[in-house]
Image (spheres, rainbow, N blue to C red):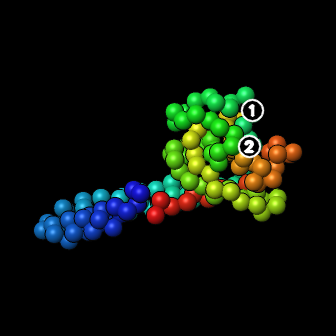
Amino acid sequence: MWFNFLPITQAFLLTSLLNEKSKKSRMNNLKTFLIAALVIIVCHNGFSQTSQIGLASFYNDKFEGKTTASGQIFHQKKLTAAHRTLPFNTRIKVINLKNKRTVIVTVNDRGPFVKGRILDLSKAAAKKLGFIKDGVTKIRLEILSDE
């Protein structure tokens, strides 16, 4: 992950700040350090989101056997999902907030493209979550670490 480089970046900026001889250079480096620290804080808080809450639906049967955005063939019986921005092959835990059932799926497609929805699931995943009859349910997704 990109934030693994933060301590190295911080150490480099702090070292360059302390090693400068002139007051003007130290002030310029201090400004650079403060801007970098602000960027790090904003990025860490804004882009390291590990969970989302929203609506999930599941794929129509007409997509069976079609190629997904990742190049894989879609199968309703596999535990897969479509998300607008998460990288392909990201594993996510999906929790149905109505009944607390969970499933782990792998992102292999883009979508959903319906306002208010954050995830499209395969039918197998929707069955495990228990919302086939409803068609849509409120979920929380949690990104699982690669470790």
Residue type pointed to by label 2: Lys
Q: Quadrant of residue 97?
A: bottom right
Q: Is residue 85 left or right of residue 75?
A: left
- Residue 9 horizontal/vertical position (percent): 30, 62
Q: Secondary structure at mark 1?
A: helix
Contact between labelled residues 2 and 1, with CB atoms less than 8 Å apart: yes
Q: Which mark is residue 123?
A: 2
Q: Residues within 10 Å of mark 1 (few under 14, many from 20)?
A: few
Whether 90 is drawn above or below 70: the answer is: below
Q: CA distance from mark 1 to mark 2?
A: 8 Å
Q: Is residue 67 left or right of residue 76?
A: left
Q: In the image, what residue occupies the spot 68% across and 30% down?
A: 63
Residue located at (62% from left, 51% from top): 105
**How many dots with numbers?**
2
Q: Mark 1 = which residue?
A: 61
- Let me know if residue 27 appears in the view: no
Q: Secondary structure at mark 2?
A: helix
Amino acid type, residue under disc 1 in the picture: Asp
Q: In the image, residue 16 lies at what x, y percent?
A: 20, 65
